[in-house]
Image (cartoon, helix red, strand yellow):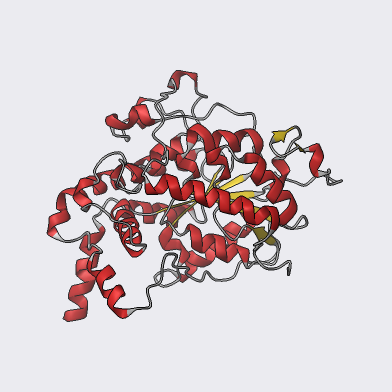
Amino acid sequence: MHESQIARIHHGDMGRSCWLLSALFAAALFFGIVNIGIGSVFTSHSAKHGALLAPARSDSKSNDATSPQSRPPLDSILHGKWNITGDPSWLLHFAIIGFPKCGTSTMMHHLGQHEQVSIFADERCDLAYNQQAMLIRDSYNHLAKEKTRGMKCPMLLESTQLGMRNMQRYFYKTKYIVGIRHPVLWFESFYNFRIQNEFPMPPPNQLFGKCTKGGYNVCTFRSSFHLFLSNLNMTPMDSNELAYIDSDYHKAMDTLPVSASRPNVFLYELSQLTSRNDAAGELDLRRALQSFLGLSLPIKPFIWIKPGVEHKNSTTKQQIDANKIDICQHQYDSLRETLQTQATNVSLWIRRHFLHAPGVFVSNKKRFNDIMEGWEKDPCLQRQWRKEQKTS
């Protein structure tokens, strides 16, 4: 295998590992029972650290998950198949941990083409299923030891009861990359993605609140990006911050314990991955991400990856497309109103609190603030304006 390519292993232990995890996730997804950030533990905010006032930074030169000078043998980390006896924290330099339908596949595939990066070619959500030994073994055996090593699991940040606690315990040096998207557009994209993959989706107006069986993990609750980010315990989450989170969701908060090793988080908004409307902003993002990951070579312009089933039969494609939604239609006004309220609260919390936490990085603070401020407007207004411009 050429070292500059994404690790694509289809045999031996790696193949069996991926098959097992895929089977577990597929089964959970089919029955709609994946635990997506709905923990019942409500951590007392009085136990958290004090206020954090440092501004969001635009770059990070450090690479915390530095490999030991002498690479230890695997059996000094893993005893047998499952018993973790050593420190695996140096194995992963970065992880793309959120959120689904926010450009994480594009990020994974694009970074995988960088000659200084070695990243799994598929999602690795091992930690969310307590399969950390499997991830440790595959990271040790299949990610290039001389490169910056990474993985992607877009629902990991929502899995605080298992996934993020395992990350904090075993990979406490790993840097996080998190993508977000306007909740209205996120919901539309996620719902249509399920339709594209031929899931028997219920009507969108039945997907208010927390996810339930039969909704295949599409629900308005999952656009509470600020709730899941707050679980990282990087801001005080006092009464002022709690006001931005729907009171019905407070019990779903499951804040991670205070750690001696505070994480570094690179936050981006989906629109920053394209140069179509802001070429300078996309360049800023690539340069900042390069610095955050400690790469000496530049990251090339992003090439958009569209995951999902590709239907080549024209009749099938027409039938599938007919079931997709345009969330700007009037029958979804109530749904869109809920998501727009969520968007405004996420925007305000991120701008007023999260961006000021030590360890939070964005590519250009002013540009990022401008994008997030735009979340306070219904994106359907701009979509309607564009349609009118085309017909005028």
In this rendering, does residue 234 appear at all?
Answer: no
Rendered residue at 35%/42% (across/down): 224
Spot occupied by residue 20 in the image (x, y as percentages of width and height):
57, 49
Residue 236, image x, y percentages: 46, 28
> Relative to 340, is 227 on the left or the right?
right
Q: Between residue 116 and residue 34, name the one nearer to us.
A: 34
- Locate residue 387: give its quadrant: bottom left
Image vertical order of residue 83 relative to residue 122, above or below: above
Q: How many labels does the image show?
A: 0
In front: 6, or 235?
6
Instruction: Where is residue 213? Give x, y as percent.
Output: 31, 42
x%, y% of residue 268?
A: 47, 54
Residue 118 vertical position relative to residue 238 in the rendered view, above or below: below
Check the image and name the residue furthest to the left: 330
Quadrant of the frame with the N terminus: bottom right
Residue found 26% across the figure and 48% down from its top: 339
Q: Identify the image quadrant of residue 196.
A: bottom left
Identify the residue at horizontal 23%, vertical 62% (top origin): 325
Quadrant of the image for the C terminus? bottom left
Q: Residue furthest right?
A: 70
- Drawn side of residue 47 relative to residue 114, left or right: left
| Residue 376 visible, this angle | yes
Residue at image position (35%, 61%) is: 193
Q: Nearer the viewer, residue 56 or 77?
A: 77
Name the side, left or right, on which 77 lies relative to 56. Answer: right
